[in-house]
Every structure is written in structure tokens, then in C-alpha cells.
Image (cartoon, helix red, strand yellow):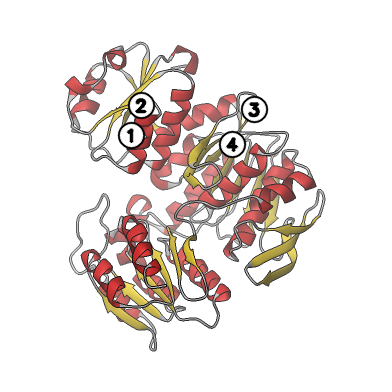
């Protein structure tokens, strides 16, 4: 179905972060936008305010009339929806055009110049940085992001005149194979989603195939030293980047009193004295990748410098709630061992002489089973680790797989405890934490505002 033929769009699983960005795109285009989600959330309520019709009961009768026309309604669903879902079955039986979110994004990369960011970790921050640089420049862009940009209060940016679209390319369920990037960053290929891929080799092969999809004349910007080997078309330029080596890298890095500055080294034009508006050590490398892609598409040194200085970050990505001499509280979506390693390393760099405690809610039984030793190693950089029960998401429990696997492998000297999610608030009331970070991609983050209120009352 061509976008010009669409008059209504129906979302099954409307409240996901990626789905909501597409919903906003179609709302802006003036189409009827409706959908189903299992539970109301802050995000679904905001979408309703913006004009989306959402219901929370699996009921065909709740589908608006405009979304029951097979010739003009596009149906978009998330893979988390079971095949037996009544509304999905209704659309399948009616021969509607039904696509995954990634398929729709793939269509957009065929009608725009897609600037895509893929990788096991860092892709949300890097894509949001790149989108902000581009959007505030003379070039502008559209963007579909995997997190809420703190600059814009949304995961979606629209431009009426730019040919560029920044997209977070998700490897889960091989979704990024629907894309046809003009240029792409690959941040990391540490094996993940082994419940989908089965083996590390299959995971790496998926990324290799993704590099084949980059359009001729475009470019791949890939982190140095990745085990995955790219296989781009002859007309695609390949650049490498990292913190301190490669075609794009940083030099003269200064971390001092809550500020971070560095020089951006580039084969196109070096940019001196770049200041990170969101001063977190892990973001230096993300910034290098974002600036590289923006520079390759025409952003000037001044625009790069201004974009990075005014970048505010992403909700749930090293997201500070309290930051003072007595208490620090932040939330981070990190849920893979390497993400947690870099997050813990960054917070240790920022607060070298303070006691750092993490409350971690593991995400998925399979990920815990596959990487419990790596999780323990990463968390052992901190002074204290409080482990909650595993957040199951789409999975059923696996016998013998609990948070205790991580607990038992934490290094000697690390204070540690096991609690349920329901005990977190009571613990925060009892304790007086110095630096506290809430880690994970589950639902523990919902308690962070309440945690912040409790800690602030102790100031």
C-alpha cells in the first residue's frame, strides 16, 4: 500500500515506544489513527490527547468505522501480539494490508534518505543525538526514535521540507532487514536476543546482511574492532570510529567539574572544543558516531558544535533525577551486560569517591540465563548491588533461572541483596543512599519518580 492511498491507520499494540512514533507521523499527516493496547500508560494517554483513538479491550466492535475499510486502512502490529488476537484475526480474515512497524519504516527509507543507527547498545542515544544535530541545522530531518528525546519531549520529529529521516534500526526479530539505509552507524554487535537468533554466529550474520542493504552511494560508519564483518556494495564508503582511533574519533578529552569537552577528529573537517550538553563519559563515543553521520550529510562545524552543546539526552538513558553534593539519583535503561558495564564505568568516573548503589531488575529469563556471569562482572564495578526479580516481558519462567544466578557471581567485596520489586520503596525509605542508579528495561522505572520524592525529602 502506497502512503498516498492510506486514509486510516490502525495499530495493534499502540503504546510501544516505536509504534507511538509512527502513530504521531500518521496523525500529523491528517489520517484517522486508532488502535488497541492492553493497558493505558502515560504514553497512550498522551497519544489520545494528540488525536489517536485508543481502546484497551480486545474487541472488534471497538475498531472505528474508518479503520474497517480494507482498501484505505493500513494495519500495523507489534510481533509481541499473539496470532490468536481477535482484532488481528479480524484484519487477517478481511485481507487488510498488515505490516510490522519495521516494514513501514522500510517504506520511509525508500522515499527519504534514511540515516539509520543499529547496534546492541547505544543506538537510541546515538540516533537521538544525530536527529537533534540535523533538526537544528540548515538541513533538518524527520526522526523515529526508540526513546523520548528530552529536547523535544517526544520520540518523533517531523520536517515538512527535509529529505532525511533518522531511524533507530532494531535488530530484534531481524526487523532492521526491512530498511534500506542511505547511511548507517553500527555501534556494537555484542550477542543479544539469543532467544530469537539461537547462536552468536546467527546474530552476527544478521548484522552482516544488514550492511548489504545500505544504498549505493551511501556510507557505513562502524565501530572499530567489531567481530562482525561488513559486506557493503562496492559504491558504499566505509568509515570506522571509536573513542580514540579510527577515521572519526576524539582527542583532547577533558572531564572536569561536571563538564565534558573534546576535539572531534574527522577526515572531512576537525571540530575543536565540542562540549557535551549531556555530560556523561559514555556519550563521548555516541557523539562521535552521531556527529560523523551528520557531518557526512552536510552539517557544518558550527552546527555540530551547537547541536552537541544543546543536546539534553533521552529519558531513561543515564537520566538524572537528583544531582547534588548529598544525593544523586539516576535511571538507566541498560539491560545488556555491556550496556551495564559502560554505564557503571561512566558513573564511577563521575563519582570516584562516593558510594554507588545499583538497583537492577534483569530483563528476560533467556538473557539472564545466557549472560548471568557477564551481568555479575559488570555490576561488580559498583559498591552495592540490589537485585530485583526478573522482568519476564514476553517470556515464561525458566526453571532455575532467577536473579540469584547474578547474585551468586558478584565479586567479593560488593555489598549485595535480593528483594522483590514491591520492597523497593520501603527500602529507599529506610536507607540514605549516596549515589543510586536504577537499572533495567523492565517496569521498575515506574517507581523512580516516587523514589526521587522520598530522597528529596531527606535533603
| Distance in Å between CA atoms under marks 1 and 4 | 25 Å
Circle 4 crowding by C-alpha within 10 Å: few under 14, some 14–19, many from 20 = many
Circle 3 crowding by C-alpha within 10 Å: few under 14, some 14–19, many from 20 = some
- What secondary structure is marked by label 2? loop
Nearer the observer, 38 or 48: 48
Q: Position of residue 265 (x, y in %)?
A: 77, 58
Q: Is residue 16 above or below residue 251?
A: above
Tell me whether circle 1 and circle 2 mark residues in contact (CB < 8 Å): yes
The residue pinned by badge 4 equals: 181
Q: Position of residue 260 (x, y in %)?
A: 67, 65
Quadrant hosting residue 321: bottom left
Tell me whether circle 4 and circle 2 mark residues in contact (CB < 8 Å): no
Which one is earlier in the sequence, the residue at label 4 or at label 3?
3
Of the residues tagged 1 and 4, which is closer to the observer?
1
The residue pinned by badge 3 equals: 163
Tell me whether circle 2 and circle 3 mark residues in contact (CB < 8 Å): no
Query: Residue 14 — which label?
Result: 1
The residue pinned by badge 2 equals: 52
Nearer the observer, 335 or 235: 335
Q: Position of residue 399 (x, y in %)?
A: 17, 65
Which one is earlier in the sequence, the residue at label 2 or at label 3?
2
Q: Residue at x 62, y 45 (%)?
A: 130
Q: Position of residue 221 (x, y in %)?
A: 65, 49
Nearer the observer, 423 or 371: 423
- What secondary structure is marked by label 1? loop
- What secondary structure is marked by label 4? loop
| Distance in Å between CA atoms under marks 4 and 3 | 13 Å
Amino acid at each position: 500500500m502506497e502512503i498516498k492511498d492510506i486514509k486510516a491507520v490502525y495499530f495493534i499494540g499502540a503504546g510501544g515506544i516505536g509504534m507511538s512514533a509512527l502513530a504521531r507521523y500518521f496523525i500529523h499527516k491528517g489520517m484517522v489513527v486508532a488502535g488497541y493496547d492492553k493497558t493505558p500508560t502515560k504514553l497512550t494517554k498522551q497519544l489520545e490527547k494528540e488525536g489517536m483513538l485508543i481502546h484497551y479491550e480486545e474487541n472488534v466492535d471497538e475498531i472505528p468505522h474508518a479503520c474497517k475499510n480494507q482498501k484505505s486502512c493500513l494495519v500495523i502490529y507489534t510481533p509481541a501480539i499473539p496470532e490468536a488476537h481477535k482484532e488481528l484475526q479480524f484484519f487477517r480474515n478481511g485481507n487488510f494490508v498488515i505490516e510490522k512497524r519495521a516494514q513501514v519504516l522500510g517504506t520511509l527509507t525508500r522515499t527519504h534518505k534514511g540515516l539509520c543507527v543499529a547496534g546492541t547498545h547505544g543506538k537510541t542515544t546515538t540516533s537521538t543525538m544525530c536527529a537533534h544535530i540535523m533538526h537544528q541545522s540548515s538541513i533538518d530531518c524527520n526522526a523515529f526514535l526508540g526513546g523520548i528525546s528530552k529536547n523535544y519531549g517526544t520520540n518523533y520529529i517531523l520536517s515538512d521540507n527535509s529529505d532525511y529521516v533518522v531511524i533507530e534500526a532494531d535488530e530484534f526479530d531481524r526487523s532492521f532487514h526491512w530498511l534500506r539505509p542511505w547511511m548507517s552507524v553500527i555501534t556494537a554487535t555484542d550477542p543479544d536476543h539469543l532467544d530469537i537468533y539461537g547462536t552468536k554466529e546467527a546474530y552476527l550474520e544478521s548484522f552482516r546482511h544488514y550492511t548489504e542493504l545500505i544504498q549505493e552511494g551511501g556510507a557505513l560508519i562502524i565501530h572499530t574492532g567489531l567481530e562482525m564483518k561488513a559486506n557493503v556494495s562496492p559504491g558504499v564508503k566505509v568509515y570506522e570510529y571509536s573513542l580514540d582511533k579510527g577515521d572519526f574519533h576524539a582527542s583532547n578529552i577533558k572531564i572536569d567539574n561536571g563538564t565534558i569537552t573534546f576535539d572531534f577528529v574527522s577526515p572531512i573537517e576537525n571540530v575543536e572544543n565540542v562540549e557535551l550538553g549531556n555530560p556523561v563519559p559514555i556519550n563521548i563515543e555516541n557523539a562521535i558516531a552521531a556527529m560523523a553521520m551528520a557531518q557526512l550529510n552536510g552539517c557544518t562545524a558550527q552546527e555540530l558544535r551547537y547541536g552537541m552543546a544543546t543536546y539534553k539526552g533521552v529519558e531513561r538513558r543515564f537520566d538524572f533525577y537528583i544531582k547534588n553534593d548529598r544525593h544523586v539519583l539516576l535511571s538507566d535503561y541498560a539491560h545488556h551486560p555491556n550496556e551495564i558495564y559502560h554505564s557503571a564505568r561512566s558513573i564511577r568516573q563521575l563519582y570516584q569517591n562516593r558510594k554507588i548503589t545499583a538497583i537492577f531488575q534483569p530483563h528476560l529469563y533467556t538473557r539472564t540465563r545466557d549472560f548471568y556471569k557477564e551481568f555479575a562482572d559488570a555490576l561488580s564495578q559498583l559498591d552495592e548491588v540490589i537485585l530485583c526479580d526478573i522482568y519476564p516481558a514476553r517470556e515464561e519462567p525458566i526453571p532455575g533461572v532467577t536473579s540469584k544466578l547474578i547474585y551468586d557471581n558478584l565479586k567479593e567485596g560488593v555489598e549485595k541483596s535480593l528483594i522483590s520489586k514491591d520492597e523497593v520503596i520501603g527500602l529507599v525509605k529506610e536507607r540514605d543512599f549516596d549515589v543510586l542508579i536504577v537499572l533495567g528495561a523492565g517496569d521498575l522505572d515506574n517507581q523512580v519518580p516516587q523514589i526521587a520524592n522520598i530522597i528529596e525529602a531527606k535533603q
